[in-house]
Image (tube, rainbow, N blue to C red):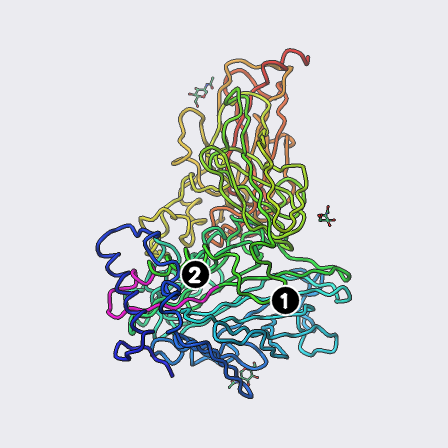
Amino acid sequence: MNCLSFSESSYLSLAYSHFMLYILLKLTTQNQIDISMVPKQFPEMAESSLSMQYPSVRLQIQDQYVVMDNGIVQVNLSNPGGTVTGIQYNCIDNLLEVLNNETDRGYWDVVWNFPGRNGTKGYPGNPSKKFKGYLDRLEGTNLTVVVENEEQVELSFTRVWDPSLKGNPVPLTIDKRFVMLRGSSGFYSYAIYEHLAESPAFDLDNTRIALKLRKDKFRYMAIADNRQRFMPLPEDRLPPRGQTLAYPEAVRLVNPVEPEFTGEVDDKYEYSSEAKDIRVHGWVSADPPVGFWQITPSFEFRSAGPSKQFLNSHDGPTSLSVFHSTHYAGEDLIMKFGPNEPWKKVYGPVFMYLNSLTSEEGPNLLWEDAKKQVMNEVQTWPYDFPASVDFPSSDQRGNVSGRLLVHDRYICENPTPGIGSYVGLALPGDVGSWQRECKGYQFWTIANEDGYFSIKNVRTGVYNLYAWVPGVIGDYRYDVVINITSGLCVDVGNLVYEPPRDGPTLWEIGIPDRTAAEFYVPDPNPLYINKLYVNHPDRFRQYGLWERYAELYPDGDLVYTIGNSDYRKDWFFAQVTRKTNNNTYEGTTWQIRFKLDNVDESATYKLRVALATAHSSELQVRINDPMANPLFTSGVIGKDNTIARHGIHGLYWLFEVKVPGTHVVEGNNTIFLTQPLSTSPFQGVMYDYIRLEGPSPSNSSKNP
Ligand SMILES: *[C@@H]1O[C@H](CO)[C@@H](O)[C@H](O)[C@H]1NC(C)=O
Ligand SMILES: *[C@@H]1O[C@H](CO)[C@@H](O)[C@H](O)[C@H]1NC(C)=O
Ligand SMILES: *[C@@H]1O[C@H](CO)[C@@H](O)[C@H](O)[C@H]1NC(C)=O
Ligand SMILES: *[C@@H]1O[C@H](CO)[C@@H](O)[C@H](O)[C@H]1NC(C)=O
């Protein structure tokens, strides 16, 4: 087969080597890569002259396998299952873990359940064991060659849902697609899931593509510019080399094969990322120098908007594209389908991209090249090659533009631009509903410094426009439903967000940005370090920080004094439970002490509390009397599990607490924030921002 080496005198390898040389030169002569200088897509750089030199894409159909080969990459799939059993590239016979069963190397899967079973019911046949759902690897039952020409091969592996299917398949009709293009250093995959009207009701927890790479080659993982490292071996996680910590995913490496990892904690959740940041992630092999990358040019198909967190690459070596999950959100993000609910959604395409170097220059060059490939993929999105009619091309989509302004009269008389706002379209719903929405598509952008935004390539359909503005509390929704049709360009003009506000700020704690990142994040226990996050902006990704609270506050809970305290140092990032001497947990009560110079007893003050996450928690607010009935309770909220998963936010909550003027006094006051629920170390809330507003000057004296 077509193992590329420089000795082969084909144009193909020459073109490729020239390209890599070009990259090398670029990288060595300047720090910053000028994207505009780089050919649009390296196979296409030669479109006019050289493209024809690339071999055509070839397809070989065998009894049990089907092979796509474009002379650069060869991909083997099971027939008709459509699982990836082999990826041959750059003289590596198979990049996937050859020690694994062929069904356990590269696959789409779904975790699902019958309605009402999640977390509440026992295992079928064994009610005492908690049943987490059925795992379905979506094995196809039929292969169709959708496209086969010199430029492209597209395969469709389908499984039509039928009540007679054995083995508890998810009640969806599945069409998994694999695409290979001429001259392209990789392959694409996407899938169409359809719930037919007559299919049974079910709950969908999780769906993804998983690729398991060879552990003898892929040791270096890269998920962001500042999140890359050599990773321990998977066997380091197993006892006695590894010691399981508070839950199975977190393992302390006590005797790893390579001593350099000794004492570190490995936990896949330390490597999760927000949807907006998952553009490229993957693994690098040193010998030969080869990179394996998953590139996601758009997150329109991922659930729950730009800030939803997903796993991506982690020890294994594993590389995932997770399209839907309940992580950092909990039960609110279980997709629930009724018995008579027709639904169809396209997940992907995502690009499995491979690159290589002719010398051992180090993994960073491969990462930089992969980032450049992201630009190429983003520029050609939405792709024009997918053959499914369910994947609309650019001209079948629409665009929405406008300008978002923020009008907070207590900050500025006139509306000001919503600088850097997140503006998106999602299925019609309540204000803020996008963070729990997962059945439709979402299209997000970031407004510029004048508040202007442009959302391109929106699929046809009916949407609300939602937004939130870093530095401003709450959520915006444009009340007019937008009906996108093919080729439509809608300009919604100036939209004005009036964030919740009833009076002047008396004091505030934190920054309203939907995360707890600005608060005090302690150093980890030296026993539980991930070296990647030492001296790193993402300090919160370390294991075990929840235990640091009781160590920092052994004799009493946190007290924050307005005017003296600094939220960056004196506000612990999570209000967690406290472990007692007898290994139970107890709730905690934090205090905010503040002074009021004068009080209008007839007026109403407003306490606004924004939470960045909650887990089986209740937030109670009392003022000046810690024993009184609470002035406010949130009720039991949240199943985000953010504290255990080292996130810095989950789902966003905003509460308004009315404080009658009779409840505060001139002089010193104390707000008591109690989280009483305490069965686990992972329970608690993270605050995003707290603000006390005084009475509105215009209203206070009018309402005796
Ligand atoms: C691989 O896994 C499949 C499905 O679980 C099983 O049927 C098959 O026997 C396994 N093959 C080997 C070689 O272990
Ligand atoms: C959206 O517009 C299309 C085309 O004009 C129309 O057929 C459809 O009924 C509209 N949908 C809604 C919900 O208004
Ligand atoms: C454990 O200790 C806490 C406080 O230290 C106490 O309230 C609780 O009753 C104790 N629980 C048991 C089971 O002894
Ligand atoms: C009010 O609180 C401040 C700061 O905590 C403290 O110094 C002062 O003594 C208190 N005043 C009264 C009257 O308790």
Residue 133 location (% of width, % of height) = 63, 67
Q: Where, quadrant-wise, is the C terminus in this rendering? A: top right
Looking at the image, is 439 positioned above or below residue 687?
below
Q: Is residue 224 visible?
A: yes
Q: Residue at x 42, y 39 (%)?
A: 518
Residue 18 location (% of width, % of height) = 28, 67
Instruction: Label 1, secondary structure: give it.
Output: loop
Tags 1 and 2 touching, CB below 8 Å: no
Residue under numbered circle 2: 267
Marks 1 and 2, Cα distance to the nearest angstrom? 22 Å
User: Magenta segment: does it hold 360?
Assistant: yes
Looking at the image, is 589 positioned above or below residue 108?
above
Residue 517 location (% of width, % of height) = 43, 42
Q: Residues within 10 Å of mark 2 (few under 14, many from 20)?
A: many
Q: Residue at x 53, y 51 (%)?
A: 308
Q: Residues within 10 Å of mark 1 (few under 14, many from 20)?
A: some
Reading the chain from its start, which is encountered first: label 1 or label 2? 1
Q: Nearer the viewer, residue 207 or 294?
A: 294
Judge from the rendering whether residue 6 lies leftward or rightward of residue 569; answer left or right.
left
**Amino acid identity at mark 1:** Gly
**Amino acid identity at mark 2:** Asp
> Which portion, as a residue range, is magenta?
351-367
Picture quadrant of residue 41: bottom left
Q: Nearer the viewer, residue 19 or 431?
A: 19
Q: Nearer the viewer, residue 503 or 177?
A: 177
Q: Nearer the viewer, residue 355 or 650?
A: 355
Residue 94 location (% of width, % of height) = 40, 79
Looking at the image, is 266 positioned above or below residue 399?
below
Judge from the rendering whether residue 43 lies leftward or rightward of residue 584; answer left or right.
left
The numbered mark at residue 133 is 1
User: Magenta segment: does it hold 575?
Assistant: no
Instruction: Label 2, secondary structure: give it.
Output: loop
